[in-house]
Amino acid sequence: MKTKKTPRTLPIIGFVALSMGLAWLVALPLWLGPGLRHSQFTLIAALMMWTPAFAAVIVSLFERRIKSFGREVGLWPVRPIGKFLLGVVLGILIPLALIFQALFVGDVLGVYPADFQNLVAVRVLAGEQSTAQFLAMQFSFAVLGGFLNALPALGEEIGWRGWLWPRLLRLGAVRAIILSGVIWGVWHAPLLLLGYNYPYSSGPMSLVYMSGMCIVVGAFLGWLRMYSNSVWPVAIAHGVFNASVGFSALFLAFGAFLEPSKMTIMGWSGWLLPAVVIVLMLVCGAFKPKDQMQDRETVHAQRVPESDSAVPKEIS
């Protein structure tokens, strides 16, 4: 008699509900107080970033998979070491590429008033320094800040790319990219509805814009998780991304208006080129789960004649 298994969607639904609920609970002081002007905003936001990790732990406890939790979410082991180290490098380069391509595309489309020639804002901020020295320092600060931001970002990545992403991949790469992005975007609701990131957009539209950005950025983070077989490079990439978004204001024409909903990586113009790259990656099979090859081997083993002594193992 076959034992009844829990549907694979139930843990995902539970994880999403817990992540959202815990995020609202942590952000409650903002809603009861002065909102984004709360004196402890940074601490509250950092604690909120760890709610996906806590949700993943809770669901794993109910699934009785807590012993393998670290391995399943990519905390350990760190191997192969070559891919891991290259993943760390990519974790620095990918978010910077996403941020800067958005500025150039926005400039070409006329929605981002860039000042790449005169660099007035850069010259003013540089003071006695040369623009080259100032920009080099800003890049180094972005990388250093990325590693520092990786700690709070790890809380999100354990949940989003560590726990959720591999499970959504069972539904197909396209669905995994869209669903994980929308979930990640809507999870920001406790902050977005207070005016965070999109201060000139209505609450519902800020959720739409944030979900769009999270779909695009999340696709590359999901791929990085698969490539490096680890969540650490993804946390670094998330940290570098958070530390580098200020570049959009640095290259903005002096006196111009910054509207996140239509410019930078936060807006629609910043998603166009990455979307093309994601489609090419899908066509090339870049998001193909590694366990599909194992599934084929399992199917092949199950077709071995009964006289063969090998017994195929069940894939969980």
Image: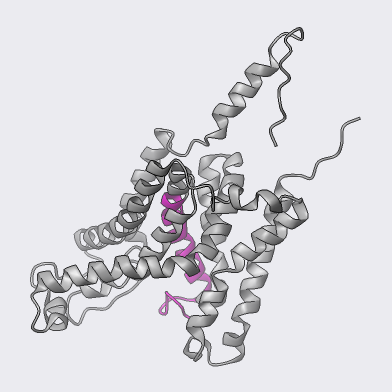
Would residue 169 be counted in the magenta stretch?
no
Res 171 → quadrant: top right
- In terms of depth relative to the viewer, which is nearer, 273 or 315? 315
Relative image position of residue 170 (x, y in whole percent): 61, 40
Q: 93 left or right of 21?
A: left
- Name the image quarter holding the C terminus: top right
Q: Residue at x 87, y 36 (%)?
A: 3
- In terms of depth relative to the viewer, which is nearer, 33 or 192? 33
Relative image position of residue 291 (x, y in whole percent): 57, 33
Q: Residue at x 67, y 53 (%)?
A: 12
- Name the image quarter holding the N terminus: top right
Q: Residue at x 15, y 74 (%)?
A: 134
Q: How is the image coloured?
A: one colour
Relative image position of residue 219 (x, y in whole percent): 45, 50
Give the vertical position of 260 relative to 68 (above or below).
Answer: below
Answer whether residue 194 is visible to the viewer in this image. Answer: no
Res 120 → quadrant: bottom left
Would residue 202 be counted in the magenta stretch?
yes
Res 55 → quadrant: bottom right
Q: 160 left or right of 256?
A: right
Relative image position of residue 202 (x, y in whole percent): 48, 76
Q: Residue at x 30, y 73 (%)?
A: 246
Magenta-drawn segment: 195-221
Give the vertical position of 294 relative to 243 (above or below).
Answer: above
Q: How many marks?
A: 0
Answer whether residue 139 is visible to the viewer in this image. Answer: yes
Q: Main secondary structure of the magenta part?
A: helix
